[in-house]
Amino acid sequence: MQDLDILQEFLIESAENLSRLDHEMVELERRPQDRDLLASIFRTIHTIKGTCGFFGYQRLEAIAHITENILNELRNGTRDLDTPLASLLLAAVDAIKKILASIETNQTEGDVFEGGLLSDLELAWRHPEQMTALPPAPAAAPPLAPTASLPVAQAAEPPPALVREPEAHATLRVDVGLLDRLMNLVGELVLTRNQVLQYNAAQDDIVLNGISHRLNLITAELQERVMKTRMQPVSRIFNQFPRVVRDLATALNKQITLEIEGAETELDRTLVEAIKDPLTHIVRNSCDHGIEAPEERLRQGKPAGGRLALRAFHEGGQVNIEIADDGAGIDPQRIRAKVIERGILSAEQVARLSDREVVNLVFLPGFSTAQAVTKVSGRGVGMDVVRTHIEGIGGTVELQSRPGQGTTLLIRIPLTLAIVPGLLVNAGGERFVIPQLSLHELIRLEGDAARNAIEFVHATPVFRRRNVLLPVADLCQILNLPAQRNAEELNIVIVQVDGRRFGLIVDAINDTEEIVVKPLWHELKSLNCYAGATIMGDGGIALILDVAGIGVRSGVIAHSGQTATANEAVEPAGGSIDSR
């Protein structure tokens, strides 16, 4: 049992180091004279070699030993790093990962013997002058496949690239299941806090008021601290992309430079896992048919090498992830022709769409403008799955493209899904929650202003807001509930989906409150208008509205994700409260 514990520690430590090693190896190709980088790579392989020898894993030790010898020569300056050697070293890292995955599963090195790799490594070490052929790049995996990643790679969170691990006594590994349970308990505490605050508001007790105030402060701080324990930097995902881009560029005979910014940006670990596949698909798309081949770029007056930028940053209480390339962009006319050819829309319908709306048709299931199917993309699967994945975690996807200049895709996701702020509204005698991320503006009208506020354009109800026609929908009508509102009052919640806005008419608007998100019952999961449920301070249940689903159900949002507005004008993002 003690040996198994030691083995587990070895696997966890190796996973942390190897998850960083791909990024370091690609960086080493760009900076072959970086001594600190070489030293870090050498230490990782040296540690693995020494420990696997202790356990008797001879194949793993052999690969690590020869790899260490080559790295030692690079470190000492007795040989230079070139592309064939870098590819061979990356192949050695892949073999080490594969063997460690087998050890993680059944404590053996597996059945496949890497004899060819050992021979190549031996040749590279003893006879470097004979290394002339470039080893083939690993075959690219299909986008968004449900493929199982290495168990060892999931053992622990990798640190940001090129940053040394903190001292052992300053950190403590905690089981993820324990953190999840702790977060659930904090959620229950938040519910109890809300109940106490609601009860205290109806009492006139000085002592109870002081106790509830103290409970509120402690709960808020505990909630913040526990959420921080679940936060992980997006470098956990970003660090894999230098290797992905390098291999794709080699396979596609392209020159692509990857720029990463904001890798230290943190969000909840469950969201880190959820965005991994969508981001991978987008990066692969950009490399395959976003960035042109060098000769094509030169004909267009561009540099031969393309640029792909990954950027993460916090804004407005959420995390923004931006993927931008300077490639060919998306041609709206080409999409228009494809949509008509496939019978998705008629020529008349397509003519009414703006270029922005046309470009966003790439999110339709099965849609692709690729002229040929490649190993990487072109089958028309992926972009609709990307949007479904992101919207499934409460996020949004926004696409902007300029033909010949490039494409930018912006993903906005909440920091966490466990506890979120929301606006409480009433409709048909029931309480509902609108997530604060979807809110843009609250409007309350009275008297004649309320009675004459709603106009109709082609049978579509609209509200004239600062000389811009905004489509509106009645929440009671959408959910088949009897309206319970004063005819002299009109409450409109302006919500935003994918950069477009529409108004939601409700019976009453209450206060904002932090809510604990609970999953829907099985019977309600098929409904697209609810995103979850929460327990209120009085013990009652309120359903959390899925704003995108409400928009689709009401008809103000098309299934492609665009708003069926009577006026194409869109105001800048921001929020305000207008009471007239």
Image (cartoon, rainbow, N blue to C red):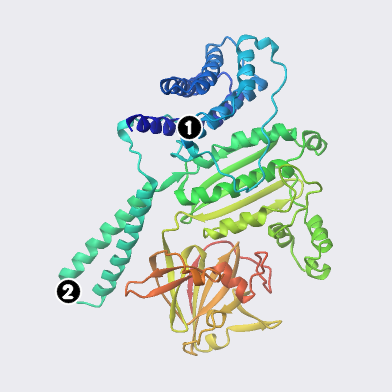
Where is residue 96, by image quadrant? top right
Q: Nearer the viewer, residue 275 or 10?
A: 10
Q: Given the image, on which type of amino acid does mark 2 rest? A: Asp
Q: Residues within 10 Å of mark 2 (few under 14, many from 20)?
A: few
Task: Provide the residue designation for mark 2.
Answer: 205
Whole-number angstrom distance, CA of label 1 to CA of label 2: 63 Å
Residue 70's spot in the image, x, y percent? 56, 15
> Residue 332: x percent and y percent?
77, 56
Residue 373 vs residue 274: left or right?
right
Viewer can see residue 214: yes
Q: Residue at x 47, y 44 (%)?
A: 265
In this picture, is 512 found above or below 267?
below
Residue at image mark 1? 103
Furthest toward the left, the residue is 207
* Callout 1 amino acid: Ile
- N-terminal of the pair, mark 1 or mark 2, is 1
Q: Quadrant of residue 500?
A: bottom right
- Judge the density around disc 1: few (<14), some (14-19), many (≥20) Cα neighbours within 10 Å: some
Farthest front residue in view: 111
